[in-house]
Image (cartoon, grey):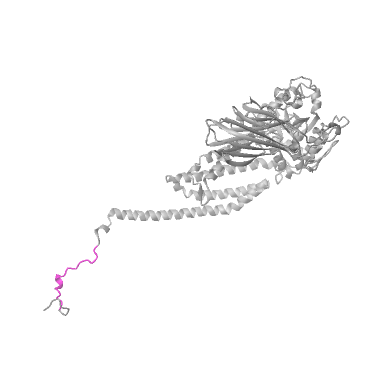
Amino acid sequence: MDLNSANSPQVVPPTEEIEIKDSAPMKKGFKLSLKQKIAVATSLIILILLSSLLSYTYLVIRAIKQEANAIAPTVFEAKQLLASQNLMALPEKISQIEEAKVKIENNYQKLAFYGKIPIIKNYYTDGQKLFAIADHGFSIADQGIAALLPYTDLLGFQGEGTFEGGTTQDRIVLILETLGEIQPTIDAIDQEIQSIVEILNSIDANRYPEKLAKREVRAQIKTAQELAATYSQTFSDYKPVLASLAKMAGADEAQKYLVLFQNDNELRPTGGFLTAYAIITIDKGVVNSEKSDDIYELDQKFTKRVAIPPELGRYLTTEKYYHLRDMNISPDFKTSMEEFYANYQTVRGEPQDLDGIIAVDTFVLSELLRVIGPIEVPGYGVFSAENHPRCDCPQVVYALSEIITRPTPYLRDDRKGVLGPLMKSILAKTYDLDKARFPELFTVAIDSIEGRHLQMYFMDETSQQAAEQINAAGRLYELKNDLKNWQMGENMDFLAIVDANLGGAKSNLFTNYEVKQIVSAPIEGRLEKTVEITYKNSRQADNCNLEAGQLCLNSTLNDWMRVYLPLDSELIEIQGISNEANVYDEGGLTVIDGYFNLEPLGLAKIILRYNVPYTDTVNYNLRMWKQGGIDAVPILIDVTGGEEELLLNKDLSYSTIF
């Protein structure tokens, strides 16, 4: 039989002889050891815990976010109340914000376990620091508002303080009497601000990414640190002023001041030609004028013969002797006033017991009248800040020029005696001003100080230091003490442009200038600069012939220009001046001194090329000093090809990289 035949029967072996095998036996490699089983179980547990942790963290963060969103409208309302000077309603809002902060902090504490995890704990600790900063902030708000509430009506805030009733003068007296009582609060707030600075500085901004979800992170932290440091320094600077304010305002003893009017239309180094003066007393905040006169009348009584300084005599060739009216040739107000006062004391009939000298220019008068409105000065007429078409300037500027400058065929003994009566009328109207306008007066004061339109010199050293601390003393030389702004060193560039009108005409009313600076990277410890100063006169000439008897507001400007630079600067080239430049050192600075003329409707360009000591090849730091009595100056600065436009309306600090 064919065994291979399809029809052949199959032989089946007995069942007991069949070996049954696993068709898919498990490979030996897939067997889990006990350790592997433990590892898998551990991984699953970690995964579950991590998932739970993330879910828990998410819920906590969501709760924090909900609390933050809920309090956000209240924070906005508090900002609005502060902007509208409504101190009375602020405490309630601050209390609500503080309660919300406690809830947010309690939620944040639920994440305290992150403080035990390496690396992550740093970020958690930084979060705790933010709550500590908030606590200091609330303390500042509580103490500050409590200290200010009694003065709300006088400071122009909404609501009535405890000094209700009586005249504004009465309230000023009460404030002066209570200034000493708030000094402990001021010290406490200062300490709170310093604590905020310390905490913020302990946060390493470089630990954070530059951006997170398209939001700046690192830059915001650094900005907060810088702002806090600035606010802290500013507050510390104003502390001695508040401590000295009572004395300056005659709280305990009447103070006597010499007030000088600097006519900035005829510019001089400290801000203007010394046109008129007044003697005033301040007794418990009340100002009284003792006398007011023409500076020429004062010079008539100045019999001391002082040789004119060589640097001035080079250009003011019409004078052989030094007059009081010219004794502000130093741009440093204290230096000028020390010389002026030493000679003023030799004038017979003038007071010998002055407590200080205060200088103001037309900016101060114009801005005050803008706030309080027109005033009438008996014997002199009406003065206002409204524009006068004859000069396109405030009417008070034109009116003073009419009174002081216009020639007359008769003697006017009182022509510059207007200063005292003018100040008296301004103060009288200020006392009756609506309290809602008081913040504007404070703004005028700050702008006047920062722009050097208002400068002070005190005989009392404490008061002088207080004035210097807030840049109200017109200082130039003692820059190292100006910690708030900068410290000059080998890697700090400096520029101050100081002009003096020696032509006798009032051409500065229509003269402005702009500055372009081109800076190269330092080579071998020297930095080369080119400075272009472009002066422009925007108006046609007036008839300045004295016989014509017309008002002369614009004529040829005969300008004595000095440029102050870092010590050991070297002049390479200068163009545009009519004489050979004089280079010398003064007060720790190098000075480039020259002379030029500017005609009405004309233009004059002075170009200086020089180098200064500078070793930092990465960072460029510049400080520009603003002369008193001038308008804001446009500045174009080009540092190795990168241009930037700035505005010099007060002392300016600028930093960039090469």
Q: Is residue 165 visible?
A: no
Residue occupying the point 54% across, 54% down: 66
Work out which residue is located at the far right of the displayed protein and give it: 410
Q: Compared with residue 459, is residue 160 higher up or lower down, i.e. above or below?
A: below
Q: Is residue 292 left or right of residue 485?
A: right
Where in the figure is residue 376, as x and y percent of width and height?
83, 39
Q: Is residue 399 magenta?
A: no
Where in the figure is residue 95, as x and y percent of width and height?
60, 48
Where in the figure is residue 116, as x and y percent of width and height?
43, 45
Q: Is residue 22 magenta?
A: yes
Where in the figure is residue 292, as x and y percent of width and height?
81, 30
Q: Is residue 333 left or right of residue 348?
A: left
Task: Give the camera-side residue of 216 and 154.
Answer: 216
Magenta span main SS: loop
Residue occupying the point 24% across, 65% down: 24
Q: Compared with residue 375, is residue 467 higher up or lower down, i.e. above or below?
A: above
Q: Is residue 530 left or right of residue 54?
A: right
Task: Give the camera-side residue of 574 and 529.
Answer: 574
Quadrant into which the C terminus falls? top right
Q: Quadrant of residue 28?
A: bottom left
Residue occupying the point 32% across, 53% down: 39
Work out which residue is located at the far bottom of the displayed protein and give it: 7
Q: Quadrant of residue 407?
A: top right
Work out which residue is located at the far top of the displayed protein and give it: 305
Q: Is residue 238 left or right of residue 30?
A: right
Task: Give the camera-side residue of 335 and 186.
Answer: 335
Q: Is residue 310 visible?
A: yes
Q: How many marks?
A: 0
Q: Which residues are magenta?
A: 9-25
Quadrant into which the N terminus falls? bottom left
Q: Quadrant of residue 546?
A: top right
